[in-house]
Image (cartoon, rainbow, N blue to C red):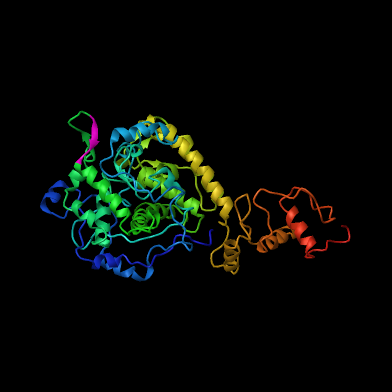
Amino acid sequence: MKIRNKAIATGVSVALTLTMTPVVALADEAASRDAASSQAVASDGALQDSALAAETVEESAVVVEEDAEAAAPEAAQDAAPAAGDASIAQDAAASDALPDWIPEGGYDKAEFYSEAEEDGIEMLSDSARAASVYPVKISKDMLYFGAYEGGTYDRTFSYGDGYHALGFYQFDHRYGLQNFLIACYNYDPAKFSMFKQFISIPAAQFQAADAIRQINEEGVYDFTPLGKALNEAWVAAAHADGEGVVVADSTFARLQDGWAYENYYMPAERYLASRGIDISDRNDAVKGLCWGMSNLFGTSGWRKFVGGVSDGYDWNGVYHYLSEGYNWPGAGLTDDMTDTQFVSVLCDYVVENVAVFYKGQPQYHQGWQNRYKREKAQCLSIIQRTGDTHDIIAGSWYVPYVEEAMRLGIVRGFPEGDFRPEAQVTRAQVAEMLCRAEGEALPEGVFDATNDTGWSDNAPNSWYTHAMNWAYKNGIFEGDAAG
């Protein structure tokens, strides 16, 4: 069990959003109710009842990472993309350079995305259940998957998402984008005034498949007035903190993190917990893997891979609708798996089965398989660097000491994917820890080619050779009579 969460609470209460004026209510999905209310908005978002929100003031859901590093993957965050006047044809021409996980023509979520009823973000349009969001900063390791989504917080509509989604997490105008915009406006009406123009647009109009781009008078696809306005407003919001604040550190970036965390990560964590699998204290890479799958396939769609009721094709080519209650076996994940095992089993299962489950979307198969091969390698690299401590028992006497030793880089866990807190420690392991504590350790993967100790069991080019040489030189160990 991971003993150190990197996603921590900002201390900004969701209740604050309910005290701001005006607080705009979320839209009902039904077009009839859209017509009846000028404040109607989209059909997807996070709901906080005022009573529930008040209860959460003292225990805000998530916190900021200890360091001040930006949350986004290593991509330039300062340069704002061109706003609504960018030509779709020009954007498509750049598709030759697309990475191997994006298919020709990009992705269209409407062809494969599936929400679970209990975790889908049900929207009500009464003022007591207003759109709310709060800023959150997540660790870079947990957000590694963002490179496969929007990649930057100021991402406008683009080729890779079929011109339907915005931002780091690719919030789609057909699902939850409008409610997110309203939540941002409710959070700070002055800073995010650029989103006020989208409040009164009926949900059905905002979510229409052709709302963002249409064929223009010249017979080519181009952004609609709504598409242009959304692009411009999104870029303006990303830079609303003013000069000197990079986009990745902006209030708007943290609000995107908060919305995605509550609507995609938390449903995934809760769902796995209902199946007896607790990921709340696992390595951030494991959390990011589950979050990314929920974000990509939907809170129902990803269950085909982890097990549970969802829709899709089975191994016999039979399609099952969500209403059938077909129970997918999943990858066979268990709570006692190490983080390394969890990642390997889940990613391999996606690669092996995604073409079966999504038989009707062959254009996406290779891209998804490439993505999860890459994600597996990334996750395992993160786990190796930060340590797999799933066998650490929360509340044990050693937890604060292990936590501090990990923070200082003195311990990391074993390559096999466990920590072994109750195991005996060898002299070589002690030497390695002391060497690291003194800042004398060699870089990862670099070994001493010679044994400078005179001890016959200090083999050259081993993981412990340098540490034992260092310990001998500094008089820490003397060896035994046998040498």
Residue located at (14% from left, 50% from top):
34
The residue at the point 29 percent across, 54 percent down is 237
Q: Is residue 172 above or below residue 419?
A: above
Decide which of 354, 62 is in the foreground and name it. 62
Residue at screen point 40% across, 62% down: 62
Main secondary structure found in the magenta portion: strand
Query: Which quadrant holds residue 103?
Result: top left
Q: Which residues are magenta?
A: 220-224
Quarter occupied by the C terminus: bottom right
Tell me if residue 337 can be seen.
no
In the image, residue 9 lies at what x, y percent?
41, 64
**Percent position of residue 81, x then y:** 34, 45
User: Which quadrant of the structure image shows residue 470?
Assistant: bottom right
- Residue 360, x across and y down, in percent: 35, 31
Q: Is residue 113 left or right of residue 458?
A: left
Most extreme residue toward the right is 481
Name the outermost residue toward the top: 219
Q: Residue furthest left?
A: 36
Please indicate whether residue 53 sits to the left or right of residue 316 in the image.
Answer: left
- Judge whether residue 223 is colored magenta: yes
Q: Is residue 39 left or right of residue 409?
A: left
Image coords of residue 196 (percent x, y):
20, 55
Residue 93 or residue 350, whichever sits in front: 93
Residue 268 in sight in this render: yes
143 or 286, which is in the foreground?
143
